[in-house]
Image (cartoon, rainbow, N blue to C red):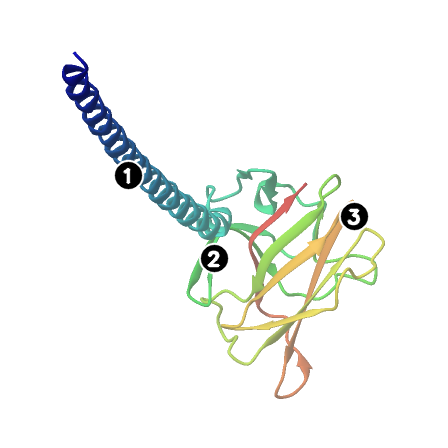
Amino acid sequence: MAGTAQPRRHGRKSWLKSFSGILASAATIVAAVASVVAAHQTSRVNQLTIVVRQQRQQLQRAAPAATEQSGSVGGATLSGGTYLSALQPTVDHADLQTGTQTMSAKTYPNSITFGCDGPANTDQPDEAFNVGGHALFRAVVGIPDNAQNATSLNETVTFANQGGTQLISPVVVSLGKPATVRLSISRVTQLEVTCSGTDPRTQQPDSSNELTLGNAYISG
């Protein structure tokens, strides 16, 4: 009987070794599969992160252009802002007009244009607008491309508050050379704009042309 018991123990050990080997192989396979899944998920997250970053950059690049060009001719309300072309001036001494203008081959559909006539008198600007309750003014200031006899003309533009105090240094523009203006108007109730023309060759006054504030708007 003792001779018949030993083969059974030997068979059990072989079976246990085989079973242990199977378990080890299964564990190795599970670990490999988990590693592949983790690597796939990491790659997927990285791809999504890149896509989100690219979309954010595209939106950031598109936002200024949309703000500059959106809206209808004659004045419209922007998100958080209003075009000056939608407002009635509080002072109009220079034949204010609204609508599309082109400066340096770029179109500004919501513009105001008026004569660069110089101050009407010592107390009155060319044009003025009620901007109370707003914090920022922005416009592209220049001479319209279709202006006649303006190739030798400099226009000096001043922006002042209701008391006549200038908000920035005078801005000088010429045909084909507009300037972007940004003003803090949080403490301004009336924005005053005055333009004076000069012939740079003779330094003589020349107030026979127009000034455009392209897509001029105020925002809170």
Mark 1 or mark 2, whichever is nearer to me? 1
Q: Residues within 10 Å of mark 2 (few under 14, many from 20)?
A: many
Pointer 3 with pointer 2, Cβ within 8 A: no
Q: Amino acid at mark 2?
A: Gln
Q: Is residue 5 above or below residue 194?
A: above
Question: Which residue is at a point 44% across and 48% down the rendered structure image?
Answer: 53
Pointer 1 with pointer 2, Cβ within 8 A: no
Q: Residues within 10 Å of mark 3 (few under 14, many from 20)?
A: many
Question: Which residue is at a point 39% across and 45% down the rendered structure image?
Answer: 46
N-terminal of the pair, mark 1 or mark 2, is 1
Q: Is residue 8 above or below residue 66?
A: above
Q: Would you name the residue on which mark 1 appears?
A: 32
Label ID, residue 143 = none
Question: Which residue is at a point 63% across and 84% down the rendered structure image?
Answer: 200
Query: Percent from the top left, x then y, of residue 104?
Result: 46, 68
Q: Would you name the residue on which mark 2 appears?
A: 101
In the rendered view of the protein, which quadrant contains the C terminus? top right
- Work out whether residue 60 or residue 53 is closer to the camera in this orientation and state it: 53
Q: CA distance from mark 1 to mark 2?
A: 67 Å
Q: Amino acid at mark 1?
A: Ala
N-terminal of the pair, mark 3 or mark 2, is 2
Q: Would you name the residue on which mark 3 appears?
A: 188
Question: Secondary structure under badge 2?
Answer: strand
Number of numbered callouts drawn: 3
- Which residue is the extreme one toward the bottom? 201
